[in-house]
Image (cartoon, rainbow, N blue to C red):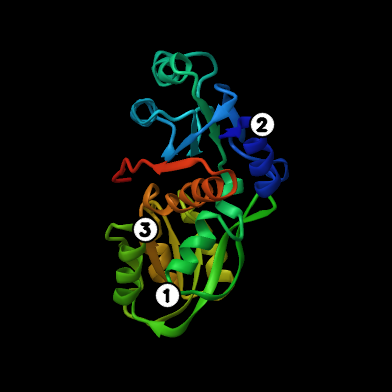
């Protein structure tokens, strides 16, 4: 059993959310029970995840994408109310970390994905409002685009979309999970051979081809399962709580 205040202190000290200019709040978004014995993690705060947390008897839901965003309407919409209802009814905390969880060098989405792909000499990469949130690295031996695609599929559980130059071997790559297609140009300026993110944009096929780079669209959801799972495992190890990752795959 752990106190939610201790869990929040540990996560805030690890992820340092105050250092990021984010698109929404990080940390506690919905207060609930003070004592936590089971943590459910998931990529995005959605009604199905919250209902699964109720079924699993969790007191804490920990996500990468929380409920509140600067680009959403203010106020309690019917959609938001339905997402909140299971949490309020069953006294479940909701905690979310967005950019801090992308950027962390050990439990971050991008560092873990770079490790899973076999990158070495990993460094911060991918500027967002003055802070790097991604990772870049080198492969010990050059990979063909097809070989890179196979590694991405093994790491994420889904086949990626390869765009642009799919003929030249790849020695270096930049990675920014989620939606960061235009960071392709930062990768090109650094002389990297490939860039990986979750989603493409219409112009990216031509951009990548003309830059001579391989663009890997690996799925927004699929590239962002790594961090929350790592955080859940960390809490289980440090506080002795149960951790269950609830996989609700999204084709995007």
In the image, residue 240 lies at what x, y percent? 54, 44
Query: What separation in Å lies between label 2 and label 1 (alpha carbons)?
Result: 50 Å
Q: Secondary structure at mark 3?
A: strand
* Disc 2 and disc 3 in contact, CB within 8 angstroms: no
Quadrant in the picture for residue 166:
bottom left
Residue 69 showing in the rendered view: no
Q: Residues within 10 Å of mark 2 (few under 14, many from 20)?
A: few
The total of numbered circles placed on residues is 3
Read off the residue under disc 2.
5
* Disc 3 and disc 1 in contact, CB within 8 angstroms: no
Q: Nearer the viewer, residue 152 or 73?
A: 152
Query: What separation in Å lies between label 2 and label 3 (alpha carbons)?
Result: 38 Å
Question: Residue at point 45% right, 74% down?
Answer: 118
Q: Residue 165 bears which disc, if any? A: none
Read off the residue under disc 3.
217
Query: What separation in Å lies between label 3 and label 1 (alpha carbons)?
Result: 16 Å
In the image, taking residue 135 as reference, residue 116 lies left or right, namely left
């Amino acid at each position: 059993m752990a106190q939610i205040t201790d869990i929040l202190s540990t996560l805030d000290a690890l992820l340092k959310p105050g250092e990021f200019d984010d698109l929404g709040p990080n940390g506690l978004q919905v207060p609930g029970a003070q004592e936590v014995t089971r943590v459910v993690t998931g990529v995005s705060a959605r009604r199905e995840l919250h209902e699964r947390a109720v079924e699993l008897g969790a007191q804490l839901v920990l996500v990468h994408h929380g409920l509140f965003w600067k680009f959403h309407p203010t106020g309690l919409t019917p959609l938001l109310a339905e997402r909140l209802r299971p949490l309020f009814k069953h006294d479940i905390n909701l905690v979310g970390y967005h950019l801090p969880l992308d950027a962390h060098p050990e439990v971050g989405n991008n560092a873990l994905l770079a490790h899973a792909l076999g990158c070495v000499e990993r460094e911060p990469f991918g500027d967002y409002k003055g802070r790097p949130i991604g990772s870049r690295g080198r492969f010990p031996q050059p990979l063909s685009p097809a070989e890179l695609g196979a590694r991405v599929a093994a790491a994420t559980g889904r086949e990626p979309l390869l765009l642009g130059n799919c003929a030249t071997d790849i020695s270096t790559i930049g990675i920014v999970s989620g939606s960061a297609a235009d960071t392709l140009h930062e990768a090109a300026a650094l002389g990297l051979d490939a860039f990986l993110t979750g989603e493409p944009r219409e112009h990216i096929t031509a951009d990548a081809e003309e830059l001579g780079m391989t663009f890997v669209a690996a799925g927004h959801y699929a590239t962002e399962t790594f961090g929350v799972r790592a955080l859940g495992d960390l809490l289980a190890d440090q506080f002795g709580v149960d951790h269950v990752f609830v996989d609700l795959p999204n084709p995007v």
